[in-house]
Image (cartoon, grey):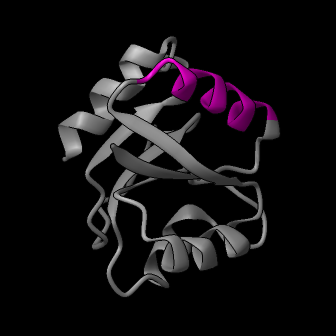
């Protein structure tokens, strides 16, 4: 079972992710965080296989959060704002737009692709 952790300041989107993970056979959502600082601390502690990460969050954006991890897991950035993404030094394995995630199957396929 692939362990996933999600960090997104949109509580409604985190609820949607939980619903989608209920339908998945190969992945489980071990925890969700709306506070990026708490999420990154949990990522270090819980050691997920895949981190689902929003880019635009208060206090600490997704890129800043990733920079704090010494050995990040596979990273899928899920954002409503992917236009104009600059090249980044941090290894991001996949980008998904929130509008593309219409089913558990779409998300599960992305998770399986990065592993």
Magenta span main SS: helix
Which residue sits at x=51%, y=71%? 46
Report the front residue among 16 and 88: 16
Report the front residue among 56 and 65: 65
Specify whether residue 86 is painted magenta.
no
Report the front residue among 45 and 13: 45
Tell me where residue 70 sits by quadrant: bottom left
In the displayed structure, 23 sits above or below 96; it is above
In the displayed structure, 60 sits above or below 83; it is below
Which residue sits at x=70%, y=32%? 13
Q: How many marks?
A: 0
Which residue sits at x=64%, y=32%? 18
Residue 108: % across, % down = 36, 27
Residue 19: % across, % down = 64, 22
Judge from the rendering whether residue 84 lies leftward or rightward of residue 11; answer left or right. Answer: left
Residue 51: % across, % down = 44, 56
Specify whether residue 19 is painted magenta.
yes
Residue 10: % across, % down = 76, 41
Tell me where residue 25 sits by quadrant: top left
Report the front residue among 4 and 70: 4
Judge from the rendering whether residue 35 lies leftward or rightward of residue 84; answer left or right. Answer: right
Which residue sits at x=30%, y=32%? 110
Q: Quadrant of the N terminus?
A: top left
In the displayed structure, 19 sits above or below 42; it is above
The stretch of residues the image draws in magenta is: 12-24
In the displayed structure, 35 sits above or below 3; it is below
């Amino acid at each position: 079972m692939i362990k996933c952790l999600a960090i997104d300041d949109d509580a409604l989107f985190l609820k949607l992710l939980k619903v989608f993970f209920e339908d998945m056979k190969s992945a489980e959502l071990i925890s969700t965080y709306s506070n990026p600082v708490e999420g990154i601390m949990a990522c270090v502690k819980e050691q997920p296989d895949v981190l689902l990460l929003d880019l635009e969050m208060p206090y600490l954006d997704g890129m800043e959060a990733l920079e704090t991890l010494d050995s990040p897991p596979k990273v899928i950035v899920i954002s409503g704002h992917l236009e104009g993404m600059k090249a980044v030094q941090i290894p991001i394995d996949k980008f998904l737009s929130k509008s593309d995630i219409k089913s558990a199957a779409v998300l599960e396929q992305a998770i399986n692709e990065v592993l």
